[in-house]
Amino acid sequence: MADEVLRVGPPARTTHDGGDVTNGRARFSGQVELPADPGVDRAPEVPVAVSPSVEPGVFVEPAPTAPGFVRIWEDEGPGQPGSVAVAASWQRKFALAVAASDLATLAVCVLLGWLVGFGDGTGPQASDPWLLAGAVAVIVPVALVACRAWDPRTLGQGAEEWSRLIRAFVSSAIVLGLGGLAIERLGVRPWVFGVLPVAGLLAMAGRYLLRRWLHQARKRGRGMLPVLAVGTEQAVRDLVERTRRVPHMGWVVVGVCTPTGLGEEGQGHVAGVPVIGDLDDLSTSVGSGRYGVVAVAPTPGWSPKRLHRLAWDLEGTGSELVVDPGLMEVAGPRLHVAPVDGLPLLRLTEPRLSGVPRVFKLMFDRVTTAALLLVLLPVFALIAFVVKLDGGPVFYRQTRVGQRGRTFRMIKFRSMVPDADKLREDLITGANDGSGPLFKLRRDPRVTRIGQLLRRYSLDELPQLLNVLGGSMSLVGPRPPLPSEIDAYTDAAKRKFLVRPGMTGLWQVSGRSDLSWEESVRLDLRYVENWSPAMDLVIMWKTVSAVFRGDGAY
């Protein structure tokens, strides 16, 4: 391949990311073309000619051709999805919608509180409901602004949005309560302990519905923020694949800068994203204002001085700078910034697997499981009756490996024929739809008719509540492996044994049997490294929809 890359083709036009590039094939000197993907629509090819005056060393963004590339609409006109202007407009409009939802919810609750007459009464400690309603109507919006609960950068994703909303309503309740105490007006109590909590819960419900709408829109490619990724080909590919797995985050990588400026195997792209230059071209690229985020991944030779220069170049462009610290699957409460003489250092604390958090998890598991068993007793009886009619025992017990490598007997409703374990040896030598050491068949002949239904909706796993009650399992945790699978585990994969296995987990809400072995290990490690009570609650909430969808269940 020639060393120089030429800019060729017809006059440039505006594309999805707001830049002026040609929309066609990227041609290297020597007429080497990027491989075409028949599954991706392309603009009609335009005959081109190499002009002697073409500036060498400049690379043209090719039309992405790699399999799996998530195309951004290339609509004509200034309002194109995938541009910084469009993404910023989406952020502003969504922030306005969230603020309108919060204020409408607050207005309804305040009006109902006034109509009911909360705080009204006789005596010196009585309060005027009108005054209390007015005070709440002023205090809560001020608290929402003070807690930055309407910051567009945190809305629609992550737990920070909920944290700020909760802080705002809790702060409002404290201010209102202390004010009533100071002037000896006990009429504030129904507002502090009734109106404000209800308003907060309803505001969370409204935001949740808006978040679901936003995520669906982003899955269709709307309102995406264009990202320029900087780093080695491997690091950039990892970032591209992660943004494609979670499009609801609102990021789409549309350009890449690598140390060589050539991409993977010199093809001019990384995972279908065009390489626009090397690290020396970065200042020119970010100065165009075409990228809402510049993401810097680990790169050999990337010095702090260079990062400072990049941050200065981004000032005034409206672009954000994000840096990958290189700490795989570690985030949230374990990361802390500890500056030393102006040098920011990331302090990494140990996973919280013991002490008060562990006691809280144990108590939550036992109490919740006992309540679920009482509620689901009729369901247990019905499933047991149907399984018994199919012939054979109702329950199936299997040895699994739990916390610290200890084995236990996991209980499930029987979904296969009684001699399924004996037939397994004959099937394992044939086809396998599982990944790594996992053995799975999409159409397993051992599964009974009623077993197919039970497996699709994970009803066969309900008896594992008895394992949770007995302490061998948890409601949320890594998948409990078979003893035969342990031999294939690496030292990293064995970290899952630091916690108790769970009935559900990140693997359950992320695809279950459709996941690759590497992805399953990565999700288990993410849970172990970043566990928190809030993560358990989020996983349990997502499990409900995952079970009803039945994705990856076989």
Image (tube, helix red, strand yellow):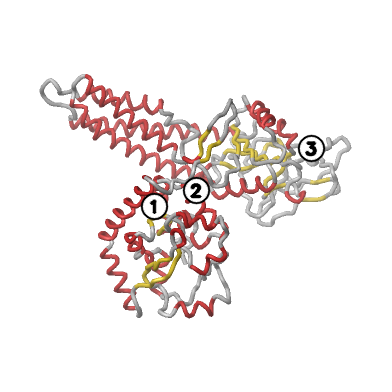
Residue occupying image coordinates x 84% and y 42%: 4
Q: Nearer the viewer, residue 57 or 398?
A: 398
Quick check: marks 2 and 3 in contact, CB under 8 Å? no
- Give above or below for 313 relative to 336: above
Question: x, y (%) of residue 317?
Answer: 62, 27
Q: Nearer the viewer, mark 1 or mark 2?
A: 2
Quick check: marks 1 and 3 in contact, CB under 8 Å? no
The crowd level at tag 3 (other Cα within 10 Å; few <14, some 14-19, many 20+) is: some
The Cα atoms of the two marked residues, 2 and 3, are separated by: 43 Å
Q: Nearer the viewer, mark 1 or mark 3?
A: 1
> Disc 1 marks which residue?
540
Judged from the image, the secondary structure of the residue bearing numbered disc 3 is loop
Mark 1 or mark 3, earlier in chain: 3
- Give above or below for 340 relative to 49: above
> Disc 3 marks which residue?
58
- Left or right placement of residue 318 versus residue 149 in this view: right
Judged from the image, the secondary structure of the residue bearing numbered disc 1 is helix
